[in-house]
Amino acid sequence: MTVQSAAPLSALSLQSERPRDAPLVDALIDRAFGPGRFTKVSERVREFATFAPELSVCAWQAGRLLGCARMWRVRVGGKPITFLGPFAVEQDERSAGFGARLIDRACQTARAVGETHVLLVGDAAYFARIGFVRVTAGQVVLPGPVDPRRILVRALDPRAGDLAGSVQAA
């Protein structure tokens, strides 16, 4: 599934996160989520996950970082998969469709290198439009409390099968 943005393709550059982008990406994430994000279960996952900058995507326009979608390598039930998040878009750009484009590009990049699933914790109504579905309650176990309706997955390969088990280090 490919999502289109309101911005013309020539105006928006989507590229893998580079080491030099990290300070800008971290600042954007801080602005978007504030210190409360450190209490969330997704942060517990990122404490042991392996960051995958080659799968992570940044959106740039005229040298300005507009958004980011970070990807991490984990395992679920022994199966290697990717975990998405955080993803953030500058406040003044949130209605332009950049978030959906970022996530879709990150998923396409993951699929291109053979990844089978992308897992995240988020709003089902938002992420359903880019191919994510709810995981059956209790099927995927995260390292802390989470509303099971917010555990979502996008299968990148139709033969990938379902995920089942605990989220663990890659």
Image (tube, rainbow, N blue to C red):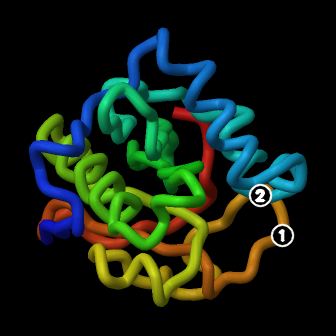
Q: Position of residue 78 (x, y in %)?
A: 47, 47
Q: Do the residues labelled 2 and 1 touch (CB within 8 Å)?
A: yes
Q: Residue at left 47%, top 11%?
A: 19
Helix, strand or loop for disc 2 = helix
* Crowd around label 2: few <14 · some 14–19 · many ≥20 (10 Å): some
* Crowd around label 1: few <14 · some 14–19 · many ≥20 (10 Å): few
Does any portion of residue 57 appear in the rendered image?
Answer: no
Q: Where is residue 76 in the image (x, y as percent from the top left)?
A: 50, 54
Q: Is residue 129 left or right of residue 139?
A: left
Residue hosting label 2: 41
Residue hosting label 1: 145
Seen in the picture, residue 99 relative to 51 is either above or below; the reply is: below
Q: Residue at left 43%, top 72%?
A: 95
Q: Residue at left 74%, top 81%?
A: 147
Q: How far apart are marks 2 and 1 (CA)?
A: 7 Å
Seen in the picture, residue 147 relative to 32 is either above or below; the reply is: below
Q: Residue 113 carries which label?
A: none
Q: Mark 2 belongs to which amino acid?
A: Val
Residue furthest top in the image: 20
Q: Position of residue 120 (x, y in %)?
A: 52, 62
Q: Residue at left 23%, top 68%?
A: 6
Nearer-the-camera pick, 114 or 23 = 23
Indicate the quadrant containing the N terminus: top left, top right, bottom left or bottom right. Answer: bottom left
Does any portion of residue 3 appear in the rendered image?
Answer: yes
**Which one is earlier in the sequence, the residue at label 2 or at label 1?**
2
Nearer-the-camera pick, 50 or 18 = 18
Nearer-the-camera pick, 24 or 69 = 24
Q: Position of residue 84 (x, y in %)?
A: 48, 51
Helix, strand or loop for disc 1 = loop
Nearer-the-camera pick, 47 or 98 = 98
Q: In this view, does 42 lie to the left or right of 24?
A: right
Q: Mark 1 belongs to which amino acid?
A: Pro
